[in-house]
Image: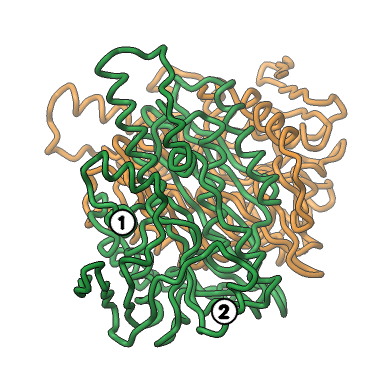
Chain colours: A orange, B green
Amino acid sequence: MPPASESSRSGLLRRIAASSTWRSDEVFKGIGDDAAVLKKDGSTYILISSETLVEGVEFDLTFLPFHQLGAKAVSAAVSDICAMNGKPEAILVNLGVPNRVTSEMIGELYKGISMACTDYQCQLAGGDLTGSHHAFIVTVTVYGLADKKSIVFNSGAKKDQAICVTGDLGGALAGLKVLLREKKHWEETGDTAMQPDLSEYDFVVKKQLIPMARKDIVTAFRQHNVIPSAMTDVSKGLLPDLKRILAGSGCGAYIYQAALPVDLQTRKVADEMKEEVDLYALYGGEDYELLFTLDQEKVDQLAENCRDFTIIGKITDKKGVVEMQTDLGEIAEFRD
Amino acid sequence: MPPASESSRSGLLRRIAASSTWRSDEVFKGIGDDAAVLKKDGSTYILISSETLVEGVEFDLTFLPFHQLGAKAVSAAVSDICAMNGKPEAILVNLGVPNRVTSEMIGELYKGISMACTDYQCQLAGGDLTGSHHAFIVTVTVYGLADKKSIVFNSGAKKDQAICVTGDLGGALAGLKVLLREKKHWEETGDTAMQPDLSEYDFVVKKQLIPMARKDIVTAFRQHNVIPSAMTDVSKGLLPDLKRILAGSGCGAYIYQAALPVDLQTRKVADEMKEEVDLYALYGGEDYELLFTLDQEKVDQLAENCRDFTIIGKITDKKGVVEMQTDLGEIAEFRD
């Protein structure tokens, strides 16, 4: 620990789920999806999810201002509700606050939280403050609702369905690389006064610092009568998140390297770092895009109305296996 | 920061609540009570609360084994549901795990969580693992239900009603003092192999390490048709928690020092530490007892069936003021 890989982590969570035996009639679906699903009434499910961000692990206060941290923590939690095709209604915020953090900083954090709540139309409905010796800790719990008719689990993908992803991949990781390079530069030169010009990298830096949960896509699904067969958000990275859909649905995937949506800035950063941009696209976390599967005719129906998604491959019957057709026409295979 | 006092903390949370403007129709009551209250159906409210425990602040792994930490984290969260006269149904657990913590330790933690879930009859329904550089971090989010007819807020206390508390006060703090003394002894002597004999302090040590949320009292209320007018749990300490009821209800309190329920072991520990045991009773946190107000005739009705509570005083109309009649017959006054 910490879990070396996504598969060891989900393995641990699976064992944990099996070890705990009490079952409540109120729970429709527990561990295993983006949010826990509980029963509300005849037509509606309740969704609950909780995200903890720890300073030094998920964020670095040297380049993430408090109000952006607040907004990002809300986005990370709300993204789990979007990933179930649901709508966020309320959040709770728990903070672990070290001595060096002032009330003014906390006030800034809550400005960001409040702005994000307005963006996502959900209410700040509770929370708590506690101390912390070292790291600043933010936990956002989100409460949302989903129609029983349109809730999407990660278990419904079927052979031959298209695999789609919104926006672009690897941008948040590229932004992080730029920020870490700048931080290293400041530390080496001691030149903390000068603000670096990051305008060449504005898109990817923004993607890292103030990602948005794709509530707009959930709205588009509803407006255009499209319900994905399976969905999750790209929070850990395309491959680990795709594998959760494959594990949930008992199937495999065939994806096209050439189809992976990568922004030009992401490509530029990878080039500067002398790294493979496809690794950014396959393993970069925190993009908070939506990854979903859909029948081909529904893809056409959605594409007529919404352009902000890409078909990156299709579902196969090779359980748990991701095959990728490379730009050279070869097949790379990713197994657990 | 961290908040120096309960009042500065609640002040900050109040300012935060006011600064965040979006309101959801699904929220019945947001910030200000033990749990957020949301709408379920015609007869039922949903309760959600989240508790974060940070190593070195809320717990010390040198004397709190992982399975007890798991159980304690669940109890702390479930206690918030009991404090609203509700029933827990499900929990989510988020962990921030430093490198030194092994998968086996996490397994032990979940054994404790699982046992507590069985005790409280609620389901482990989700959660997440992340890393942490220093402290081990446990956040438990609890989902519960309350009947609209019997939910209890902290805002319903009325003049002349009795103020009651379950169990005893200051025990968890006394237990902590004993454990810290033993820890200091081990550190000074280097004698880590010898297990100290703490049997003289078994009650208070247990109260610190494995407190129980008073779900049994909520059950007794239901069985005997008693609904408190206001309630909260004693998590921060009698005085700060009583002040939350007074603030919520716009009233004051008159309490009797002689009536404060203190266990003999708590008294013994205070004597050994050369400290005032009443300070343990007034300010000791983590007892997770229930503090509630009730009409006098209802007190009699409850007392006929349930002996595990004490009347410690009555509600007055002196807004926000706690007066305490001391053993010497003097009146001590506690204002914010």
User: Which chain is indicated by disc 2?
Assistant: B
Closer to the camera in the image, B291 or B93: B291
- Three-letter code, disc 1: Tyr
Closer to the camera in the image, A100 or B271: B271
Task: Measuring from the top left, give residue B109's x and y in whole percent.
Answer: 57, 32
Circle 1 sits on which residue? B283
Label 2 or label 1, whichever comes before in sequence order: 1
Task: Measuring from the top left, give residue B222's x and y in whole percent.
Answer: 68, 71
How many numbered markers are drawn? Answer: 2
Which SS class for mark 2?
helix
Give residue A3's mark. none
Q: Can the viewer see residue B335?
A: no
At x 30% / y 12%, what residue is drawn?
B190
Which corner quadrant of the image does residue B316 belong to? bottom left
The mark closer to the camera, 2 or 1, is 2
Q: CA distance from mark 2 to mark 1?
A: 28 Å
At x 27% / y 42%, what residue is drawn?
A98
User: Which chain is indicated by disc 1?
Assistant: B
- Quadrant location of the C terminus of chain A in the rendered image: top right
Q: Can the viewer see residue A269?
A: yes
Circle 2 sits on which residue? B300
Q: Is residue A66 left or right of residue B175?
A: left
At x 29% / y 78%, what residue is drawn?
B320
Q: Is residue B97 left or right of residue B254?
A: right
Which corner quadrant of the image does residue A317 belong to? top right
Q: Residues within 10 Å of mark 2 (few under 14, many from 20)?
A: few
Which SS class for mark 1?
helix
Q: Is residue A242 above or below residue A143?
A: above
